[in-house]
Every structure is written in structure tokens, then in C-alpha cells.
């Protein structure tokens, strides 16, 4: 287990360095931040002064080396635009994105798995078919459109929910969260549902497919023959066996829901990292782009590690480290 | 299951109500389209920032809704001679903390401006011409310049005065946190969260009288559809930059009002004349290289201008939110000529001119433009290309994000460049100098002349105008320069953008040419 963790850590470090280099090359290839930062009315002297102040006059590899040296000591550079350490800027916005993503995931899990189970157990019933049809809509409608329709219905027509922003926050273990206040919940409802919709549909379909396969298995028939209650058959025997693919997908999707909440965040003006990233890319604010992607890659690495550990707990046949895995 | 869902929805509805009722009588929320990157008035010379700063801080000279210079913290100013300007400062003005405003604060401000660390776009451009400052008495100050500097009042109007008392040890972070953001303006900074919101509270001791609002919240709503939705749902009472696609719907709705105004931003085309060889993306129709640069021929440039139907672009692409342009600024601005109407649409004349210039069957080219910088920029590029196809020029269109586009345009990698230019000084002379004077960055001439257009006669006139302090004489020179440039089709002006604001009914907003959104211009109705 320890050797496994150390090996994973080494691989992760390599991925992080490679990623930062690629982003550096990418941003360098897109264009010159000075063109966007310096006011067009400014003269050449100002332009050169700014270029030098931001270190953009140095050769590309030297710029990268300066960054690596800083990164080794935990300094990912200051935002060109905001003059604030890039990491600070992202960490300020991260709680909002995490909250949105987690609430969306919780919604998806607690609605998706029961609905999927129902649809899997009664595939030919009216409700079962309805759930499946709904999940197709959830899959195929574009997020930004659903978001706007939600706003049109719940904010503009009915006036129930606010159309944008994050509600009041309170500190929970030092982190500002909004799901504990009334206005926070009201602000959270639509964006979280909008973000959850796709994952919800995915989980419904996964659970349904798994369930349909599992109920035909001998052990389920045997459990029924033993006279176990329906609840126990489904809750323990079926659910536990279909959970492995679902956990994998939830793990992967949690990462992507954090990293790619961008569309939802910009429609609902949710003050998270997605909106920050888009603005930073448009302005070629390289320190922020690099820092954001490093944070996200780290996140993916951690989530994947946790998923692997969870596997070994759910399925005793899986051993961490690979070599000892039984077939 | 369903009952639980219904209960949950009802609960949310109840919880949501207080959030909607927050807009009481003297509070207002405004939706902005771009982020405010700092509350340090000398950190980042960027329109959204400059607009926001005007609430908290004030310059010596202000600009009215038409960008005319009006007294701010200075009650009057005059040029004593070509190199000396005297400013009389307003008396009995106090900063938000009660400390008095004096000439020392002006001296401190001028010292601070060029020394803001890491400033991505410095205000030093505006203070650099001032080489010496003399305080005559606490309310009289004299600026000396090294050479005659006609834009001095306009430059002074771009520099916010900060308090010496609070600014001396302050960094940009101290302004962002509000600690040092203590100005003389009508509002005090209450909260600044980058990329999210700015909250202002009224400054009841303001010298200019009381404002109608106790509290103003600016929300950053970069997504245009979200901005409109926020207005429709009552989360904000005013939004700026209404997307053209929503204008018809909003103006038909009795609950909202739209105001608009032509802006100081011209959308124009630069034609690459850097080399005598053909510019990039210009070829003969069969793909073979042309023998010379067609854009160096004034007849070709004119043909490219008169073949564009500007009125059609204004009517159809811009939903009437643009005004066809014949020069760099609408004709009520300083230095504009009454003799320069937009070029008449004349495709036949254009064909004739092309034939005269030696291109009877046209050539092939690519129109390059941005797709996220100006209002409907990619659609304008498409429309222009269609007009050219009509006169026999094979035209392709390529648009790209501003982050990619400007770097390449500055390097001269395009032949036909669709661009925009806002004249912050409100004077056509400075725009002619930046866009059309022969490129010579060491003299500050032609700094944004991406076409490298060059005309010695025009250069001489611009130089003379920019050294003539007498307003009347200077205006005549600028007008003459503009006429020479436009009659030579030095660039192709397309239109002036019209900015649009939407408010809930009962609010009145005074629209501005500089596209600023100011709470000071918003009044409750009746």
C-alpha cells in the first residue's frame, strides 16, 4: 500500500510538470498578453516597461524556469490582471465551485440511483419508461439552454428563485459555505440542478443497466428463493453488486463537474473558478491559467486515488498495487 | 416521492422571496458586463475600472455625458503659456474620512501614478508629459510640460486624485480591501470582490450634493443572456450592453425602458500597406501571387470603402444599434469635420475604380476580424465579405478570439483587418495620431498604425495640430487632417457603436458616449 502510494505520487509529479509545460507552450503560442493588457492609447515606452515588469521580455525557456523555481517553493506567480497571487485567487473561488459541484453530485446520486433502480426493476412500467425518456432529455439538451429555461421559468415567470449569484455564506470549519442559509439554498437550487442534470441522467442509465443484468443472476434468484424481503434483495444483493461501475463513474464525474462547471457558472454568474478560468483565458492571464489547471490535475489525481481505495473496499478481489490481483 | 418534491419546491420558493425583495427604495443593483480588476485607481487603465473609479474618486477635470471637459476637483484651468497650465482647486472638499483635499494630494497622486508595482496598463501615459509641479497655494497648482501638450486637460481628466494621508504607504491590495480606497467621490467603497461584485455606500458629505441612492450594488454578469435574465427577474434594476438580439423583445415590453447613445468607438478597417509586395492573404483569383500591393493604390482603397453598404449593416446586422461612420468620431466631437459623411454605397463605382487600378476582374483576399471583442464583430466581417463578392473580389472570412487576433494583427500577419477604436480623449486629433500618422513609436506617432499607412502631408498637419494650444486653431487643423486622411481612404470607417442600457420602468439613465455605466447617472423616476 505504501509503495503503491509513493509510486503514484511520483507519477503524479511528472504529470504536473508536463502539464504546466504544455500550458506554458499553449499560452505562448496563442498570443501576447501585452496586446490585451496595455491600453491601446499607451505609447511604446509604457508597453516596454510593462513587458519587462511582467517578465515577458525574457526568452520563453527562461520564463518557464522562473516559474518552475517559484512553483517548487509553492509560488505559482501573480495574476497579470489582478496583481494577486494566482493560487490565492483560485483558492478564494474554489469553495464556491466545490459547493456547487458537491451539491450537484449529491442531487445526481440521491435522485439517479433510486430512479435507475426503479427503471431497472420495472422496465416496462409507465413510470420506468418515463424515467428513461427523461434521462434522454437530460443527456441531449445543452446545459446552457436548460439553464436559461430554468431562469425563464423559476426567476422570470414564477419569481421563486434568484437568477444569479451566490447567496449569503456562513463559515463552516473556516470555509465559507452557502448551503446552510436560506438565501444560499435559494441561489444554489437552480445552478446545482442544472449542473446535476447530465450526471443524473448518466447515473439513471448506469444503474438501470446494472440492475437489469443483476436481477437475472442466480444469486438474486437464490436470495428470493430464500424468502428474503424485496428490500433486502435489492438494497443489499443487487445494489452492492452494481455499485463498482457506479463508483468509478461518480469519481470521474466529480472531477469533471468541478473542472467543467464553467457553462453553468457563467449563466448563473456563480462566483467560482470556472468563470475565473474563462476570463483568464480571454485575457491570456497565464499565471492563473497554469495555477488553475495544476489545481484541477491535482484534484483528479486525488479523486482517482480515492476511487482505487474504495474499489478495494467494495470488492475484496481487487488489491492495490496490481501485482497481487486475483482473477 | 412527488409530494416530497412539491414540498421541497415550495420551501425553496419561500426561502427565495427575501432575496428578491432586497431592492428597497434607495438601493439599486446594476448588472455590468466586464470584471473590475482592481479598486486601485492607478493600477489598470481599463474602461470598466475607470468607470467604477468615478464613484469613489474624482479627477481634477471630469467629462460629461458627451465627453466634454467640465470642472471636477478643479474649478477652472488655463494655459498660461504653451508650457504652463494653472489649475484652481475646489475649496471645502473633504475625503470620505473627513480630511481636507488640497494641492498636496494632487502632488502625491502625480508621484504615485508611475510607481504602481506590476501595473499591467499604467496611467503614466497621462502624467508623463508633466515634468514639473508647483504648488502656489493650497488651492492653486501649476503644471509644467517639456513641450506644448494640447491634451493636458484631457490627460488630467483620466487621473483620479487619491488622498496623500491614506495613500503614502498603500499598495494595490490596500485599495482593493478598501483600507486606502478613500476618495472624494459621491460613493464610498463598501465591498469589492473581483469577478463578482462591488458594493458602494453613499457619501453623505459629498460636495456636489446628495445622490439618490444609499447603496449601489454592481454585479458582474459577463454572460449577456444572464444579464438580461437578471433584469427580467428583478435581481438588478439596470444592465449595460443589452445584446442586440434582446433589444426588440425588451423594447416591446412595457415594464422596461431602453436608452441608447452613439459611442466614441468606431469600427474600422486597416489595410496593410507595410510592403510594396502583396500583403498576406491577397492573391490573384487563381491563387497566383499579385505583382504588387493593391492596397497602396488609393483607388483600390476607395473601391473597398464605397462597396460597403453601411446602412444595411446598421439596419440588419446591428438592429439599428450603430451609426454609419465617415471619420473616427461622431461629428459632435472636437476636431471632427462636417464635410465627411459616410461613404455612399456605390458598387458600380467601385467596379470602375478597380478596373482603373488594373484589377478589372478583382482579386482574392481574406477579411480578418475578432469574434468576441466588438458588438457583432464576426457578423460584420461576414456582411462585408458579401459586399466584396458582389464587386468581383473573392472574399474569405476568418474570425478569431481577441487574445489570438491582436498579437497577429500587430505583427502585420493580416492584409484586411477589422478593428475598433475608442477615443478616450474625445478629440479626433489623438486618434489620427495613433492610427494614421507614420509609424514612429519613439515620437509617439502612429503607435497603433497596424496598416503602416504613411502620408507626409498628414503627418505634418497632425504634428502642427498637436502643438497648437489654441483650441479654435487646433480644431481647424485637425479637421483639415481628417479630411485629407478620409479622402485618401487611409482607413475604412464602418460605423460607430451605439451603447444600449436597459432599466426597469421608472428609472432614468443618462447615456454616455464613453460607454461608462455610472450610478451617478441613474435616477429614480418622478
Image (cartoon, coloured by chain):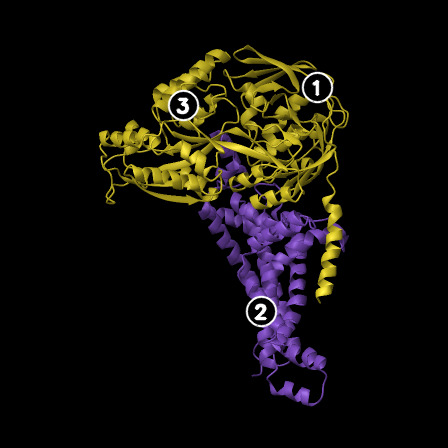
Residue B102's mark? 1
Does the image show residue A6?
Answer: no
Q: Disc 2 sits on a residue from what chain?
A: A
Question: Tag 1's secondary structure?
Answer: loop
Q: How many angstroms separate mark 2 from mark 3 (CA)? A: 63 Å
**Residue B505 position in % (x across, y down):** 65, 35
Colour yellow belongs to chain? B
**Residue tagged 3:** B341
Residue B490's mark? none
Q: Nearer the viewer, residue A116 or B256?
A: B256
Looking at the image, residue A98 lies above or below residue A200? above
Residue at 46% x, 15% y is B475
Colour purple belongs to chain? A
Quarter of the picture containing the C terminus of chain B is top right
**Residue B281 position in % (x across, y down):** 32, 42
Q: Disc 1 sits on a residue from what chain?
A: B
**Residue tagged 2:** A132
Q: How many angstroms separate mark 2 from mark 1 (CA)? A: 73 Å
Question: Tag 2's secondary structure?
Answer: helix
Residue at 66% x, 71% y is A114
Q: Is residue A47 left or right of residue B311?
A: right
Question: Tag 3's secondary structure?
Answer: loop
Q: How many marks?
A: 3
Toward which corner of the image does residue B168 lie, by quadrant?
A: top right
Q: Nearer the viewer, residue A249 or B26?
A: B26
Mark 2: few, some, or many residues within 10 Å (few <14, many ≥20)?
many
Mark 3: few, some, or many residues within 10 Å (few <14, many ≥20)?
few
Q: How many angstroms separate mark 3 from mark 1 (CA)? A: 47 Å
Amino acid at each position: 500500500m505504501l509503495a503503491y502510494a509513493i509510486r503514484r505520487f511520483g507519477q503524479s509529479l511528472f504529470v504536473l510538470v508536463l502539464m504546466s509545460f504544455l500550458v506554458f507552450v499553449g499560452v505562448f503560442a496563442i498570443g501576447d498578453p501585452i496586446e490585451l493588457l496595455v491600453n491601446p492609447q499607451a505609447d511604446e515606452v509604457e508597453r516596454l516597461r510593462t513587458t519587462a515588469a511582467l517578465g515577458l521580455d525574457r526568452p520563453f525557456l527562461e520564463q518557464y524556469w522562473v516559474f518552475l523555481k517559484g512553483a517548487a517553493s509553492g509560488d505559482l506567480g501573480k495574476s497579470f490582471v489582478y496583481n494577486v497571487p494566482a493560487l490565492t485567487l483560485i483558492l478564494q473561488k474554489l469553495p464556491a465551485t466545490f459547493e456547487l459541484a458537491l451539491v450537484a453530485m449529491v442531487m445526481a446520486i440521491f435522485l439517479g440511483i433510486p430512479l435507475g433502480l426503479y427503471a431497472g426493476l420495472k422496465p416496462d412500467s409507465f413510470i420506468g419508461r418515463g424515467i428513461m425518456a427523461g434521462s434522454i432529455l437530460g443527456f441531449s439538451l445543452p446545459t446552457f439552454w436548460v439553464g436559461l429555461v430554468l431562469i425563464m421559468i423559476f426567476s422570470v415567470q414564477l419569481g421563486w428563485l434568484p437568477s444569479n449569484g451566490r447567496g449569503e455564506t456562513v463559515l463552516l470549519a473556516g470555509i465559507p459555505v452557502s448551503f446552510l442559509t436560506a438565501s444560499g439554498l435559494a441561489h444554489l437550487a437552480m445552478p446545482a440542478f442544472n449542473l446535476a442534470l447530465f450526471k443524473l441522467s448518466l447515473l439513471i442509465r448506469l444503474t438501470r443497466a446494472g440492475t437489469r443484468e443483476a436481477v437475472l443472476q442466480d444469486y438474486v434468484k437464490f436470495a428470493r428463493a430464500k424468502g428474503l424481503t424485496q428490500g433486502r434483495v435489492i438494497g443489499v444483493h443487487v445494489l452492492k453488486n452494481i455499485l463498482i461501475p457506479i463508483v468509478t463513474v461518480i469519481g470521474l464525474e466529480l472531477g469533471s463537474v468541478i473542472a467543467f462547471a464553467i457553462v453553468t457558472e457563467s449563466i448563473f454568474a456563480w462566483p467560482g473558478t470556472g468563470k475565473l478560468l474563462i476570463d483568464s483565458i480571454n485575457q491570456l492571464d497565464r499565471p492563473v491559467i497554469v495555477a488553475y489547471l495544476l489545481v484541477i490535475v491535482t484534484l483528479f489525481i486525488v479523486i482517482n486515488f480515492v476511487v482505487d481505495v474504495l474499489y478495494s473496499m467494495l470488492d475484496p478481489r481487487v488489491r492495490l498495487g496490481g501485482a497481487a490481483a486475483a482473477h | 416521492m412527488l409530494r416530497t418534491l412539491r414540498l421541497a419546491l415550495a420551501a425553496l420558493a419561500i426561502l427565495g422571496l427575501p432575496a428578491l425583495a432586497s431592492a428597497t427604495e434607495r438601493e439599486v443593483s446594476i448588472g455590468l458586463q466586464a470584471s473590475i480588476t482592481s479598486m486601485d485607481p492607478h493600477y489598470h487603465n481599463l474602461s470598466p475600472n475607470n468607470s467604477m473609479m468615478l464613484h469613489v474618486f474624482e479627477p481634477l477635470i471630469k467629462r460629461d455625458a458627451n465627453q466634454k471637459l467640465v470642472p471636477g476637483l478643479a474649478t477652472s484651468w488655463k494655459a498660461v503659456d504653451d508650457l504652463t497650465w494653472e489649475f484652481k482647486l475646489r475649496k471645502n472638499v473633504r475625503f470620505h474620512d473627513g480630511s481636507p483635499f488640497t494641492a498636496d494630494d494632487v502632488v502625491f497622486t502625480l508621484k504615485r501614478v508611475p510607481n504602481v508595482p506590476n501595473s499591467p496598463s499604467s496611467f503614466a501615459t497621462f502624467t508623463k508629459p508633466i515634468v514639473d509641479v508647483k504648488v502656489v497655494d493650497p488651492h492653486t497648482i501649476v503644471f509644467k510640460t517639456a513641450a506644448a501638450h494640447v491634451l493636458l486637460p484631457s490627460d488630467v481628466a483620466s487621473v483620479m486624485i487619491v488622498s496623500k494621508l491614506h495613500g503614502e504607504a498603500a499598495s494595490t491590495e490596500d485599495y482593493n480591501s478598501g483600507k486606502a480606497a478613500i476618495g472624494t467621490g459621491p460613493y464610498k467603497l463598501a465591498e469589492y470582490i473581483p469577478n463578482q461584485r462591488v458594493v458602494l455606500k453613499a457619501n453623505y458629505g459629498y460636495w456636489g450634493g446628495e445622490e439618490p441612492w444609499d447603496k449601489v450594488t454592481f454585479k458582474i454578469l459577463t454572460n449577456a443572456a444572464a444579464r438580461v435574465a437578471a433584469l427580467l427577474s428583478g435581481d438588478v434594476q439596470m444592465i449595460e450592453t443589452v445584446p442586440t438580439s434582446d433589444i426588440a423583445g425588451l423594447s416591446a415590453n412595457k415594464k422596461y425602458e431602453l436608452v441608447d447613445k452613439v459611442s466614441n468607438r468606431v469600427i474600422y478597417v486597416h489595410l496593410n500597406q507595410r510592403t510594396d509586395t502583396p500583403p498576406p492573404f491577397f492573391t490573384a483569383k487563381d491563387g497566383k501571387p499579385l505583382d504588387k500591393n493593391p492596397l497602396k493604390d488609393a483607388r483600390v482603397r476607395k473601391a473597398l470603402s464605397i462597396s460597403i453598404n453601411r446602412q444595411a449593416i446598421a439596419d440588419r446586422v446591428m438592429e439599428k444599434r450603430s451609426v454609419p461612420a465617415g471619420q473616427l468620431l461622431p461629428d459632435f466631437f472636437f476636431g471632427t469635420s462636417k464635410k465627411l459623411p459616410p461613404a455612399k454605397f456605390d458598387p458600380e463605382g467601385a467596379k470602375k475604380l478597380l478596373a482603373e487600378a488594373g484589377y478589372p476582374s478583382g482579386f482574392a483576399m481574406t477579411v480578418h476580424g475578432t469574434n468576441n471583442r466588438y458588438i457583432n464583430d464576426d457578423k460584420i466581417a461576414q456582411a462585408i465579405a458579401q459586399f466584396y463578392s458582389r464587386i468581383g473580389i473573392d472574399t474569405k472570412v476568418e474570425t478569431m478570439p481577441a487574445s489570438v487576433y491582436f498579437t497577429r494583427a500587430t505583427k502585420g500577419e493580416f492584409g484586411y483587418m477589422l478593428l475598433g477604436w475608442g477615443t478616450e480623449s474625445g478629440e479626433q486629433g489623438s486618434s489620427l495620431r495613433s492610427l494614421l500618422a507614420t509609424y514612429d513609436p519613439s515620437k509617439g506617432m502612429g503607435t497603433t498604425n497596424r496598416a503602416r499607412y504613411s502620408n507626409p502631408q498628414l503627418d505634418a498637419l497632425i504634428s502642427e495640430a498637436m502643438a497648437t494650444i489654441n483650441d479654435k486653431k487646433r480644431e481647424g487643423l485637425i479637421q483639415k487632417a481628417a479630411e485629407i486622411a478620409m479622402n485618401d481612404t487611409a482607413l475604412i470607417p464602418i460605423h460607430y457603436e451605439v451603447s444600449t442600457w436597459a432599466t426597469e420602468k421608472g428609472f432614468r439613465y443618462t447615456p454616455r458616449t464613453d460607454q461608462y455605466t455610472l450610478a451617478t447617472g441613474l435616477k429614480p423616476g418622478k
